[in-house]
Image (cartoon, rainbow, N blue to C red):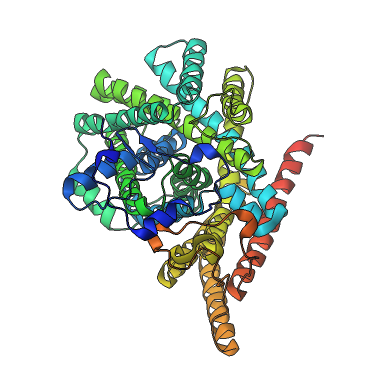
């Protein structure tokens, strides 16, 4: 056990002052020593990490949030999209995963920064800074989306169990018990060790890669050269690309990592270590997704099943048919592992969000008797998903489609809120985004909006033509460019960029950046949205009205069909 409190403590005057500062932390369990899976750091340990050993010990203690959120994202949905891409189109879409690396890092780095500096979860910040309408919208939709996502995790569990020959009922019950027990011990370190064991289990996909050994040269070429599969319908390929984006950059990740950073008691002075944790997690998840796509492509290349994807369970059967039982079993076990960690992380993100909003006790440091609402949400979602999966006659395929559609609608909105919060000086003080980061994230939001419109439209109107898709991409790009130029021109005419929450807060004086924390919520200065931010909000509201209206119209059509 590594205990950083044993490191020689050398505390500066400013660091002493930092200990007495009032923060916005809502649950006292979020204050105290860091107890990670691989080490501890005392709350009053402000010693400089002046040598490599001290820095490595600190990193080991901090490791966890980035690894868990990233590997948890490589869940049933990710297995489904990666295997579908490989079986239907070979390795031609590997480049999409490479392009997602900076998007993943930027999005998740912003939420880890928000968590460490604010001490408050994502949902509560949206409520406090943008009002009840947007706060209720974000939490209600997150709850619905996460509940459906957890169902897909249990669908993946049943597929893996079916191949492994384990009875569906007992396998699902065992998975439910494992996921619920792991989080309900009242010991944060114990849960994190359980989760990191599952992270280690995700490495099972790499022996499968060695068994099947797809051509490395072709993989490298398809990673570096973006191209579309020859002869494939553009609308089908675009839908799959959007699905890859949606399963790799999901709204629940934002809520989970911010709250988990808070619950682990990570503060601004450890942000650089948490960034390393995140980068390691991204490397694992992208490498894993690439491996899955590549060995699935090689499994079915030149065989009748190529181009006829069914589900991840059928991939195991194909592996056994063409490469033997060993890689098939490893793949099924990797799928099972991914679904368990996915179900746990997604359920936690929901419980954290509701705990934040309703000011419940919400911490893995607490036992169920101390945080009844928090654990009721966590366990209730798991049980509900398991019951739905085990209920005969439930159309699970429709639920999967609903998850994809709803995620496509919500993802741009979640990213907009994230961008606005990371430019709120009352919340982040000296940790606000740089101009370059804002430009990059704004471009990501614009692309996500276009892709989600294509996704929503294609699910509602399956015969959406290539011309319409290209029109959305070209027209959306042009509209985004015009809007950006319009905002820049308006700001120039005003004489200078409009400030947004630039007033210093009561604790900014003489506090070094590494110790700056957001003040209590009631002491925050009122929100002042810049012209650009107001435009973002108007665009977001309009987008949600249009996309939501289309979804509701399609639901009405399905409900009245044949009446």
Measured as percent of width and height from the top left, residue 247 is found at 46, 43
Comparing 250 with 475, the one in front is 250
Q: Quadrant of residue 538?
A: bottom right
> At x 65% / y 52%, what residue is drawn?
127
**Can residue 229 be seen in this snapshot?**
no
Give the quadrant of the C terminus: top right
Comparing 42 with 199, the one in front is 42
Measured as percent of width and height from the top left, residue 282 is found at 34, 46
Comparing 425 with 462, the one in front is 425
Measured as percent of width and height from the top left, residue 360 is found at 63, 36
Q: Quadrant of residue 521?
A: bottom right
In the rendered structure, the answer to whether residue 341 lies left or right of residue 272 reads right
> At x 53% / y 52%, what residue is drawn?
23
Most extreme residue toward the right is 563
Q: Quadrant of residue 207?
A: top left
In the rendered structure, the answer to whether residue 352 lies left or right of residue 62 reads right
**Can residue 282 be seen in this snapshot?**
yes
Give the quadrant of the N terminus: top left
Comparing 20 with 180, the one in front is 20
Please tell me whether residue 292 is drawn above or below residue 465 in the rendered image. Answer: above
Please tell me whether residue 502 is drawn above or below residue 252 in the rendered image. Answer: below
Q: How many circles with numbers are drawn on the protein?
A: 0
Measured as percent of width and height from the top left, residue 163 is found at 39, 18
């Amino acid at each position: 056990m590594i205990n950083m409190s044993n490191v020689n403590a050398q505390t500066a005057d400013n660091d002493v002052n930092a200990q007495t500062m009032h923060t916005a932390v809502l649950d006292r369990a979020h204050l105290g020593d860091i107890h990670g899976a691989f080490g501890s750091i005392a709350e009053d340990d402000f010693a400089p990490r002046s040598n490599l050993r001290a820095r490595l010990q600190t990193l080991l203690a901090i490791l966890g949030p980035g690894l868990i959120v990233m590997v948890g994202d490589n869940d049933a949905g990710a297995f489904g999209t990666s295997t579908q891409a490989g079986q239907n189109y070979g390795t031609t879409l590997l480049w999409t995963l490479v392009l997602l690396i900076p998007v993943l890092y930027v999005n998740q780095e912003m939420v880890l920064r928000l968590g460490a500096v604010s001490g408050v979860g994502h949902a509560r910040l949206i409520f406090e800074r943008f009002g009840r309408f947007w706060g209720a919208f974000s939490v209600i939709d997150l709850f619905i989306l996460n509940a459906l996502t957890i169902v897909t995790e249990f669908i993946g569990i049943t597929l893996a169990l079916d191949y492994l020959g384990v009875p569906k009922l007992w396998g699902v019950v065992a998975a439910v018990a494992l996921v619920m027990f792991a989080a309900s011990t009242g010991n944060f370190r114990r849960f994190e060790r359980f989760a990191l064991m599952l992270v280690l289990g995700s490495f099972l996909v790499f022996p499968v890669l060695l068994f099947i050994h797809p051509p490395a040269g072709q993989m490298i070429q398809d990673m570096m050269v973006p191209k579309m599969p020859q002869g494939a319908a553009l609308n089908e390929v675009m839908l799959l690309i959007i699905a890859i984006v949606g399963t790799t950059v999901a709204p629940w990740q934002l809520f989970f990592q911010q709250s988990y950073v808070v619950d682990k008691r990570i503060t601004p002075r450890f942000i650089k270590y948490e960034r390393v944790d995140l980068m390691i997690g991204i490397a694992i998840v992208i490498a894993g997704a690439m491996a899955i796509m590549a060995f699935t492509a090689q499994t079915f290349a030149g065989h009748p099943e190529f181009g006829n994807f069914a589900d991840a369970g059928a991939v195991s059967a194909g592996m056994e048919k063409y490469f033997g039982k060993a890689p098939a079993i490893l793949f099924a076990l990797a799928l099972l592992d991914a679904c368990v960690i996915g179900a746990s992380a997604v359920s936690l993100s929901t419980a954290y969000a509701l705990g934040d909003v309703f000011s419940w006790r919400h911490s893995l440091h607490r036992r169920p008797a101390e945080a009844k609402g928090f654990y009721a949400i966590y366990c209730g979602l798991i049980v509900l998903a398991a019951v739905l999966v085990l209920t005969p006659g439930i159309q699970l395929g429709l639920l999967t489609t609903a998850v994809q559609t709803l995620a496509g609608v919500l993802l741009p909105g979640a990213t907009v809120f994230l961008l606005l919060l990371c430019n709120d000086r009352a919340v982040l003080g000296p940790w606000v985004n740089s101009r370059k980061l804002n430009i990059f994230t704004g471009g990501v939001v614009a692309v996500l909006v276009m892709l989600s419109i294509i996704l929503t439209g294609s699910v509602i109107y399956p015969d959406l033509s290539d011309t319409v898709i290209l029109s959305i991409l070209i027209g959306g790009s042009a509209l985004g460019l015009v809007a950006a130029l319009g905002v820049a021109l308006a700001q120039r005419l005003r004489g200078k960029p409009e400030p947004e929450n630039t007033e210093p807060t009561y604790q900014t004086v003489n506090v070094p950046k590494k110790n700056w924390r957001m003040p209590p919520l009631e002491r925050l200065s009122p929100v002042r949205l810049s012209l650009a931010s107001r435009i973002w909000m108007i665009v977001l509201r309009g987008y949600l009205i249009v996309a939501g209206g289309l979804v509701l119209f399609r639901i009405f059509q399905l409900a009245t069909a044949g009446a």
